[in-house]
């Protein structure tokens, strides 16, 4: 294979008139805690120019040349006591050449911006793929500047869903009972095919025009906030898209990881914390590419890392975000990402970030949560991680039965929760049964509504921040073995002419209604249950594949009983005396039935009881 990136630098002919083509970040704010700002300026033959700014409180600290002649990285200081919001000129000067000028703006921050509250265990996150959720504006399905056009007949093509489609159905999400929305990436993916998923970003500062515009995205966030819904942006630091604007003119050769020939990552994440790992294996994992279409970014390049930190803060501040989900977190340079997380949390102490840590064991995932204890004395500064161990268990445990000492069925859930001592903050774990990359719950449950109810009841009452995947709440669920398109289906009713409109209560099938009504009741109940959000958890070792646990605080107590058997089970309640503490009756959330607990309780087959007791 030929060496990647045959041309590393594009040297413009001297007779081409110099011009400014791009400045990032496009604007900034006064009043940020970090008073330093790095401007990336891209234009033809600008590398030998000096930079002048004549604006009170703005000082040029250093002008840094790149390897390409078409970049300048300008370090500024913004004096918090002097600088005011406003527009001013930045001039690039070079002897015997015409000055280049562009206007830059400092804005005022929103009131209370630094104190924004991120997502938490009080939330339920609704994950959706914009291209597959709803098409609110058919006029942006095909954009001249974007090579891939809409083709709904192709399950790996673009289908036309967009930001307006999401905004049009905020009431549906609110009715369901979710309190936060996580969209897969909405930034531009200017690729010839398979661009719908969003994970090959070609412009980190621009919403893909087939989804909408930057202004439309900000309006969507504002509309969500008005409905009481938070918004989490999906970001990607590990890789960009092969058609990213900088790929034909890299500022530095090491802006990305380059190899003599195409070199894939080994996906051996264990090498990162393996004290015996060879350096060559660590390098192959970290620096290898995900795919030929996804160049691997070099977080060790200080200019890139500053660029990415600022880009993340720029989106938070400009769009008023409530959280970030960072893709493929463990594939990045861990020290650089700790720097990124710390920079954001310093600016927004009450914010939240969750990293995708798709590892097989609890001890592996816990390593990546902020303040974890480990032999390397490494602190990721990452507040939240995704509990993939629990996710994998939820897809299988309801189809399993075994001996008390076997790690199957309810024992599997018990054993995972029993490992919580490894996490510094169990309430800040993202817990889920499925997402856009995994096998689907309704498929593995074989569309058994009762098993689905058990899984969701557990998810909504255990520790952590529950996340559900769009369509699950109406019984959707494909087979990943048939390809990603099977698990990224169009939401019924999101396109004109759909035969079923599941957004509308009257348009749902009877099966869809049964799923939705259950989920809506469960999620809306959870909204105001502090005992579930932050209460303590005591659980009991499963017997006869029945798992019992309590959530409790000083004011309230909830008892959860999961019967994973195909027959009814009778439990003697004396065993739970330390948590019942004299309580003799409990009312089931879903059925409203009152259960007597003085001596025993009969639990129906394949059922989860969520028993509430009178508040103190």
Image (spheres, helix red, strand yellow):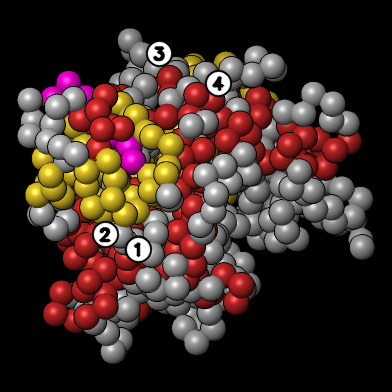
Q: Check the picture and name the quadrant holding the C terminus.
A: top left
Mark 1 against mark 4, which lies toward the viewer?
A: 1
- Report how far apart the C-alphas of labels 1 and 4 lie in the structure: 42 Å
Please name the residue shown 30% across and 86% down the image: 498
Residue range (magenta) = 548-556
- Report how far apart the C-alphas of labels 3 and 4 lie in the structure: 36 Å
Earlier-in-chain disc, 4 versus 2: 4
Earlier-in-chain disc, 1 versus 2: 1
Mark 3 against mark 2, which lies toward the viewer?
A: 2
Mark 3, residues whose alpha carbon is within 10 Å: few (<14), some, or many (≥20)? some
Question: Position of 408 compared to 252: left or right?
Answer: left
> Does the residue at mark 3 contact the one at mark 4 (Cβ under 8 Å)?
no
Please name the residue shown 26% across and 59% down the image: 604
Residue pointed to by mark 1: 567
Mark 3 against mark 1, which lies toward the viewer?
A: 1
Quadrant hosting residue 552: top left
> Does the residue at mark 3 contact the one at mark 2 (Cβ under 8 Å)?
no
Earlier-in-chain disc, 1 versus 4: 4
Visible in this render: residue 34?
Answer: yes
Please name the residue shown 24% across and 28% down the image: 577
Judging from the image, what secondary structure is the residue with disc 3 in? loop
Residue pointed to by mark 3: 79
Task: Indicate the position of residue 291 as horizontal and vertical percent values.
Answer: 73, 58
Please name the residue shown 26% across and 24% down the image: 578
- Report how far apart the C-alphas of labels 1 and 2 lie in the structure: 7 Å
Mark 4 against mark 2, which lies toward the viewer?
A: 2
Quadrant hosting residue 164: bottom left
């Amino acid at each position: 294979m030929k060496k990647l990136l045959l041309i590393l630098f594009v040297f413009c002919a001297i007779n081409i008139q110099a011009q400014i083509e791009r400045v990032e970040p496009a604007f900034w704010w006064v009043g940020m805690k970090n008073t330093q700002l790095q401007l990336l300026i891209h234009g033809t033959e600008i590398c030998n120019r000096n930079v002048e700014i004549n604006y009170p409180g703005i000082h040029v600290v250093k002008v840094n040349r790149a390897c390409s002649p078409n970049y300048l990285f300008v370090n500024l200081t913004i004096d918090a006591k002097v600088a005011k919001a406003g527009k001013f000129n930045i001039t690039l000067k070079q002897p015997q050449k015409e000055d280049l000028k562009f206007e830059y703006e400092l804005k005022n921050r929103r009131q209370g911006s630094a104190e924004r509250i991120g997502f938490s265990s009080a939330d339920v996150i609704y994950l959706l793929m914009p291209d597959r959720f709803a098409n609110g504006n058919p006029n942006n399905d095909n954009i001249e500047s974007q090579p891939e056009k809409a083709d709904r007949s192709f399950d790996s093509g673009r289908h036309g869903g967009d930001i307006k489609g999401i905004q049009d159905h905020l009431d549906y999400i609110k009715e369901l009972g979710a309190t936060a929305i996580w969209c897969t990436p909405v930034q531009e993916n200017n690729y010839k095919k398979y661009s719908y998923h969003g994970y090959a970003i070609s412009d980190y500062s621009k919403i893909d025009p087939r989804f909408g515009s930057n202004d439309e995205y900000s309006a969507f966030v504002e509309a969500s906030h008005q409905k009481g819904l938070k918004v989490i942006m999906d970001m990607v630091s590990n890789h960009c898209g092969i058609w990213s604007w900088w790929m034909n003119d890299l500022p530095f050769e090491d802006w990305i990881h380059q190899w003599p020939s195409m070199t894939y990552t080994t996906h051996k994440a264990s090498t990162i914390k393996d004290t015996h790992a060879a350096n060559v294996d660590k390098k192959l994992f970290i620096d290898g590419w995900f795919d030929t279409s996804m160049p691997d970014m070099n977080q060790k390049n200080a200019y890139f890392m500053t660029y990415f930190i600022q880009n993340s803060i720029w989106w938070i501040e400009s769009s008023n975000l409530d959280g970030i989900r960072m893709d493929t977190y463990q594939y990045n340079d861990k020290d650089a990402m700790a720097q990124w997380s710390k920079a954001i949390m310093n600016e927004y102490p009450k914010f939240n970030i969750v990293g995708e840590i798709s590892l097989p064991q609890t001890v592996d995932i816990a390593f990546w949560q902020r303040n974890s204890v480990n032999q390397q004395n490494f602190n990721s500064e990452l507040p939240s991680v995704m509990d993939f161990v629990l996710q994998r268990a939820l897809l299988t445990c309801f189809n399993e039965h075994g001996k008390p000492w076997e790690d199957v069925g309810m024992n599997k859930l018990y054993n995972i929760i029993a490992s919580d001592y490894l996490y510094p903050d169990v309430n800040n774990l993202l817990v889920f049964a499925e997402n856009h990359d995994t096998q689907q719950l309704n498929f593995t449950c074989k569309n058994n509504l009762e098993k689905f109810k058990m899984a969701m009841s557990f998810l909504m009452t255990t520790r952590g921040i529950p996340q559900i995947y769009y369509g699950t709440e109406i019984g959707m669920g494909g087979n990943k073995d048939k390809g990603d398109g099977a698990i990224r289906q169009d939401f019924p009713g999101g396109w004109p002419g759909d035969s079923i409109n599941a957004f509308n209560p009257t348009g749902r099938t009877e099966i869809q209604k049964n799923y939705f009504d259950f989920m809506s009741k469960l999620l809306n109940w959870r909204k105001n249950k502090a005992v579930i959000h932050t209460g303590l958890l005591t659980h009991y070792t499963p017997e006869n594949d029945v798992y019992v646990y309590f959530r409790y605080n000083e004011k309230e107590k909830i008892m959860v009983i999961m019967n994973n058997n195909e027959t009814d089970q009778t439990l003697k309640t004396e065993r739970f005396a330390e948590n019942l503490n004299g309580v003799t009756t409990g009312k089931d959330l879903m059925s409203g039935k009152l259960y007597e607990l003085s001596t025993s309780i009969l639990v129906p087959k394949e059922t989860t009881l969520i028993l509430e007791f009178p508040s103190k």
